[in-house]
Image (tube, coloured by chain):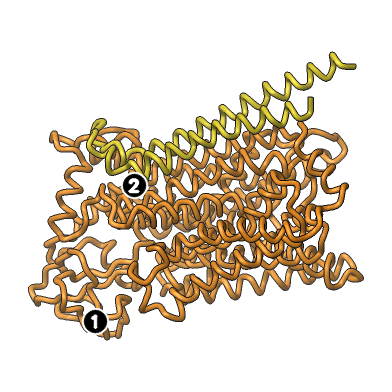
Amino acid sequence: MDTQILTYIFVGVSFALYIGIAIWSRASSTNEFYIAGKGVHPIANGMATAADWMSAASFISMAGLIAFLGKDGSVYLMGWTGGYVLLALLLAPYLRKFGQYTVPDFIGTRYYSNAARLVAVVCLIFVSFTYVAGQMRGVGIVFSRFLEVDINLGVIIGMCIVFFYAVLGGMKGITYTQVAQYCVLIFAYLVPAIFISILMTGNPIPQLGFGDTLLNSDIYLLDKLDKVTTELGFNAYTENTKSNIDIFCITAALMFGTAGLPHVIVRFFTVPKVSDARKSAGYALIFIAILYSTAPAVSAFARMNFIDSVQEVQYKEAPNWFKNWENIGLIAWTDKNDDEIIQYSSGNALEGVKPIFNNGRGASGQRLLNNKPDSTNSNEIYIDKDIMVLANPEIAQLPGWVIALVAAGALAAALSTAAGLLLVISTSVSHDLLKKTFMPQITEKQELFYARCSAAAAILIAGLFGIYPPGFVAQVVAFAFGLAAATIFPALLMGIFYKRLNKEGAIAGMLSGLIITSAYIINFKFINAHLNSADNWFLGISPEGFGFIGMIVNFVIALIVSNFFSKPPNNIYSMVDKIRQP
Amino acid sequence: MKNNYWRSNLKILSILLSIWFIVSFGFGIILSDFLDQFQIGGFKLGFWFAQQGSIYFFVLLTFIYIFLMNKLDQKYKDNNEEDH
């Protein structure tokens, strides 16, 4: 059967499954309402948390980024899993014990101040918006490839679907839908990885396969990859190119940001017992680790296969996937030496990096570009890193149903996270910002109305970011983490572990973290983008890693300011004492 | 009694988080280039810690935490019952 039709069937069936489960569990939830204490099993909650957590960035982009970054890409692997340890050990059990509903609720109560709540809401909206923007780009790429439309139209279709899914359907909160989404996405991730691992190394476990020897040879895959990449003028795949301090800071920013991500924290507010909060976090980490330990294997396979299948190939003979992605505009080829053969090596193929297509076709049938070729190197290929996971099964020539499965999995990943984030954005605007701060007199109905408006606005803005992305999906998302690390994480951590911190300290800390981090990022990404290189960075720390510095600034300012003002009232001391008891 | 519980909790946290730091920031980043001279199978050791090993340790640490905290909760609960 045609891959296109299979994709429609797989995506259609998986959507029917989510909706079916939503209807079924809604019917039984009235029942549950009367039988108190029959909560969700920690394993199910763990899967749902994992689905919430693993976004389009994890599913679509991460392996692609690592494929081109090599060892530098480890920051995403360690950062996004290591932060989970912090969440499980330092925050989840205590926030569950505290027993309120939102992160600003905790901050507002612990720091006995509406101003603190307001600052927390602002930080949280900032973080969630940036994060949603990354998701929309991912959804757009999936739709554009499988409906064979332009990337921007793909983002718009994605916006419509997320809108119906999240704003009108309200499917989020139904744990079992997310359990189903987890199963679909992990299956879709593992199947092609296992297939490719067997094809390349004969080892069915991808985690071991990429450290194994190539089939019918005694050369290790990674050694071969190191050799091939250096020959093409890249850095060796298994060696770092970034400085250690930059890698350290990026990893730290991602870790502490993970622990401060509101839509993940919220899940632990709702489990029945503190011990269950711990257990859920543990299971969630296992389910996340399955994908994250497979990802670097996928990256190594993809890089190897990509080079093998395009390097020194006649454009006319180039595989179909190459031309499909070129039609969408995420691959471009410029024949620098007019030999009609594709040459791939390091360096930018085009001046201005991103391709601008016109409607013409060249001598070999390739799409013509308005950009001039970059004459400083001989690389002829532009490739968008975000397509690697989606293209990987095609590059390895797997059967059509595997390709369709990957599309369904990618959508599951993007939708579950986008829906979770939109819920956080809309409740924080309607509940924390309007109801509890500015307009306490509004009715429940009005509150719901504002919630929907803010979700719609969030999708629109996110869509714009998806069309005009400031970076690749995973990099956009990395900014969200930097901001979360610099603002929310320190306020939560000190709220639990340092009783003496008063409202003045907490507010000053959050504000300084927010301002310094966003100023640094905006400066290097938007205002002075041409200065964005290691020579100009503060201590050689890139904007992606600056959230860690923002976090340290937050801690220091909070502690200093706190000492100049009076202690928190006694009831706060006893509240913190209570959170700390089992 | 209450303070003992919190103190044991902090002790567990600091031990586990030290290991967390060593396997990721230590072996995966700072000492990574040094460890790369050793090889297990096709993996250089530093590379393996950065892309695989640290993740496995994270899972392990979280489950050790769950186990230790459940034991601590149990002990605290038992002691409390003796008091009454």
Question: Seen in the image, is A256 located left or right of residue A223?
Answer: right
A524 vs A342, nearest the viewer = A524
Q: Residue furthest top?
A: B82
The residue lying at 55 percent from left, 44 percent from top is A84
| Amino acid at circle 2 | Val
Disc sitting over residue A298 in the figure? 2
Tell me where residue A24 sits by quadrant. Answer: top right
Chain hosting mark 2 = A
Q: In orange, which chain?
A: A
Chain B hue?
yellow
Is residue A84 toward the left or the right of residue A247 in the image? right
Residue pictured at 43% horizontal, 51% vertical: A76
Find the residue positioned furthest to the front. Answer: A564
Choose the circle earlier in sequence order: 1 or 2: 2
Image x and y of residue B9, in percent: 66, 31
Label 1: which residue?
Answer: A368
Q: CA distance from mark 1 to mark 2?
A: 31 Å
Q: Secondary structure at mark 1?
A: strand
Identified at 37% across, 42% down, the residue is B28
Residue A513 seen in render: yes
Q: Are marks 1 and 2 on the same chain?
A: yes
Q: Residue A99's x, y, as percent?
A: 79, 45
Q: Is residue A190 visible?
A: no
Is residue A337 positioned above or below A388 on the image? Answer: below
Q: Nearer the viewer, residue A339 or A545?
A: A545
Residue A201 on image: x %, y %: 23, 37
Q: Label for residue A558?
A: none
The quadrant the C terminus of chain A occupies is top right
- The residue nearer to you, when weighing A340 against A269, is A269
Q: Amino acid at mark 1?
A: Leu
Q: In which quarter of the view is residue A95 placed? A: top right
